[in-house]
Amino acid sequence: MVDTQTQLIHYQFETETDLTDKANKFLTYLENLEEQSKQLHLLAENELSSNLGLIIDEAKEKIQQRTEYQQLYYDASKSSMKNMAAKYTDIINSMNSHQLTIYYDVIKKDES
């Protein structure tokens, strides 16, 4: 007598790897750009600090608004890059393992 059975297993072909460091190069460039932007803001602020007037006040306000906008952009970009690196890690790790179905026959001895 033959009894066909199945078993579902999860097979890991490769060990899981953390690939989130792939974002580091981009993050370094972004942080350098952010630092240079801050330095430019400080330079413009210092140049305008010794002057007075409506146009100067307007320029200071526009520079401040632009700096705040850029900071939001830098923060969002860094967060986005970290999230994409985490998703990349998940995709690669999911490709390194698969679910397998094993079909096998159990042969039972006839006890007669």
Image (cartoon, rainbow, N blue to C red):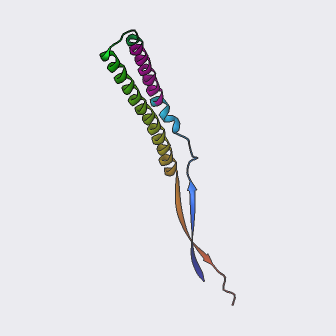
Position of residue 68 measured from the top left corner of the image (x, y, whole percent): 41, 28
Q: Give the position of the C terminus as an image quadrant.
A: bottom right
Q: Residue placed at 44% from the left, 26% from the top? A: 29
Q: Is residue 57 left or right of residue 19?
A: left
Of all residues, the one furthest to the top in this rendering is: 50
The answer to which image quadrant residue 72 occupies is top left
Position of residue 51 measured from the top left corner of the image (x, y, whole percent): 36, 10
* Front one among 58 and 75: 58
* Front one among 78 and 40: 40
- Seen in the picture, residue 104 relative to 61 is either above or below; the reply is below
* Front one among 25 and 44: 44
- Seen in the picture, residue 44 relative to 72 is either above or below; the reply is above
Q: Is residue 65 magenta?
A: no
Q: Which residues are magenta?
A: 27-45
Q: Is residue 41 left or right of residue 18?
A: left
Q: Residue placed at 32% from the left, 20% from the top? A: 58
Q: Residue placed at 40% from the left, 15% from the top? A: 45
Q: Main secondary structure of the magenta part?
A: helix
Of all residues, the one furthest to the front in this rendering is: 53
Position of residue 59 measured from the top left corner of the image (x, y, whole percent): 33, 19
Position of residue 61 measured from the top left corner of the image (x, y, whole percent): 36, 23
- Seen in the picture, residue 101 relative to 74 is either above or below; the reply is below
Of all residues, the one furthest to the bottom in this rendering is: 112
Q: Is residue 109 left or right of residue 13?
A: right
